[in-house]
Image (tube, rainbow, N blue to C red):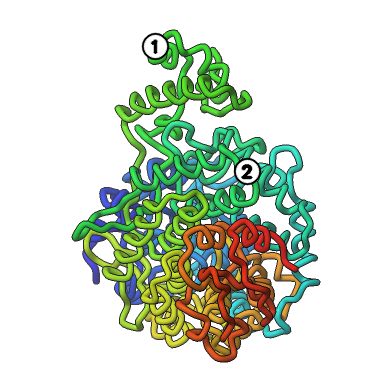
Amino acid sequence: MAAPENLLGQETSPYLLQHAGNPVHWRPWGKAALDEAREANKPIMVSIGYAACHWCHVMAHESFEDPKTAALMNSLFVNIKIDREERPDIDHIYMSALHALGEQGGWPLTMFTTPDGSPFWGGTYFPPEPRWGRPSFRQVLQGVANAFHTGAEAVTQNTKALKQYLDRQAVASVGDAPGPAHLDAVAQAYLRMTDPEHGGLRGAPKFPNPPIYRFLWQNGFRTGQGEAWDALHLMLRRMSQGGIYDHLGGGYARYSTDDIWLVPHFEKMLYDNAQLLELLALAHADRPDPLYAERAAETVGWMMRDMTAQRIDGKAAFAASEDADSEGEEGRFYVWTEAEVDSLLGAGSEAFKRAYDVTPGGNWEGHTILRRVTPRGARDEEDGLARARDVLFRAREKRVRPGWDDKVLADWNGLAIAALARAAGVFGRPGWLERAREAFDFVVTHMGASHGGVEHAWRLGRVTAPGLIEDQAAMARAALALFEATGEAAYLTAAERLANAAQDAFADGHGGFYATAAGASDVPMTRPRTAADNATPAGNGMMAEVLGRLFHLTGGADWRARADGVLTAFAGEPDQLSGMPTLLAAADLLEEAATVVLTGSSDALLAAALGAPDPAVVVLRVSGTDALPADHPAFGKVAGPGGAVAYVCRRNVCGLPIADPLALSQALRTRV
């Protein structure tokens, strides 16, 4: 039997360490905690959150730090605390169970399970006293424990029903690969949901939903209809001038609590900013805009300055997140009063206040969240505002900073690496590409897995969570982005190794992939399996893209067959495809991608290829077309007398050689 004490002090997760001083006898997730529950015949109370979660902090202060509540928890339950970013596989299981119970999801996630980890009831935040029609947390604890020990029929029924529900979720539903009709239907449904005034999807809270907008953007090139492009441009412009953007330090908050992008939930996540950086690059490649270039540079600046994790041998990956709270208050680090602005800026304060909505009463709870409300001015005006922002930034740096979660997550780093590689090409920033290479090297060096892929989480010199399909897919996708940007064969080899590791350890036998590797010993009930995107793209969707790109880059028929396998593995229920925009984008890429074959050496042609606005463009550099597989459509084609040329190949047919970079850019703006 484990000691009656809090065991989280032995962990490395910043979120778990936030709770190491609680009087609750917390256990980390694992076999030992499950064994303890079985031996004591106690139900388990699972609490799941993450370091930057505001309401997780609230429930911790109200309940987990309260000695009376902790004593009740300790007497009635084995209490397990999980960092959802470290164990998204376990979080997925219990969040799916919560949805099956008819509850709205969110964090903190509170799930009650039998001693073997099977869920039977749950919720999210519970107040310390009855409030808003919800029982107090202590009432919940007593009621659930009583139901478990008296053998309440609801416990048995719920456990059985939830197991059946989770089993059904993991069953393959094979069908024909998604085609144009499916893509059109999903795209039109999303476009009907967009906010025509403020951008993004209608309503509040308002999230950026990068997987949806990346699919819409790519699908616009397939159809030639500009409505999808306009939707992304509108969202990026509104977000980039709104309060959801940090106008002093760079980077976007996770979401806006209103429908006009004014009041953010102030936490900043690596995964959001990685995906938004890629969207900024794609939008700029389509319609160059100083706003996009500035926001990209500022966001990368934030990533490099504030999100660089622990360095080892001079190299570092990126940290996970920055908290919403500082000094116990949400947003305190980021907001201003008019008096503070006047004091710091002096004579320049009036122009700044006019531009950034600084008023005597503020725009949020008596304070001001900076947002740009005036149009772009002349060069001298913008220079003056930039100087004012710098003054405020330096003053803000003296404040108590929000909490920082510096663990390294392979999948989020994969998204960041791929985004940096694309943005480096679009904005002409080679330093960003070097930072992407550094992060890639760190992950594969320090987070390598025995199956040939990568593990999921790392901190303080040790791996803290096993690899998931998202990690293999995101890092393989990052490797291909680096291969296309650098032409170095080692990155192609790395992508192939990661894809093969996924096949060996995660394959579901029907063409798709489980979330967890074979042999995972601490996953309760059924191995999760999904292609549905959330705030981040699903591993199966990213893997379908990886396999499709490998097919276009190598011509290998096996890569195409494997890409088809993923697409068909989730297509048996077409009404579910709307939740899988990354998978749909991969289906389009497999059939419609333009492979740009560059022969010879031309920086201008390479820049044109890497700067294409269509995500379904694949860039392959070769010394000569004879180096290609014999069945490649560009094999044996002869370059013109000028040397370096590009062949644009679609649907197994290549066009005439292109030597003019402008002509190549034009050719990649449309699919003909």
Foreground residue among 589 and 498: 589
Q: How far across and down, in percent of the image, does residue 322 sit? A: 39, 45
Q: How far across and down, in percent of the image, does residue 279 sit? A: 57, 52
Give the residue type that dot 2 points to.
Pro
Residue 205: assigned label: 2
Picture quarter containing residue 488? Answer: bottom left
Give neighbour class at mark 2: few <14, some 14-19, many 20+ (Cα, 10 Å): some
**What secondary structure is found at the residue carrying circle 1?**
helix
The residue carrying mark 1 is 343
Q: Report the residue at 42% width, 60% height from top.
A: 417
Q: Report the residue at 77% width, 60% height from top.
A: 224
Which circle's residue, 1 or 2, is located before the other in the chain?
A: 2
Q: Image check: 165 left or right of 60?
A: right
Foreground residue among 552 and 25: 552
Q: Mark 1 vs mark 2: give the one in front.
A: 1
Foreground residue among 273 and 441: 441
Q: How far across and down, in percent of the image, does residue 73 sit? A: 37, 56
What distance separates the C-alpha of mark 1 from that of mark 2? 34 Å
Q: Report the residue at 67% width, 49% height from top.
A: 232
- Whether residue 549 is situated above or below residue 61 in the rendered picture: below
Foreground residue among 571 and 618: 618
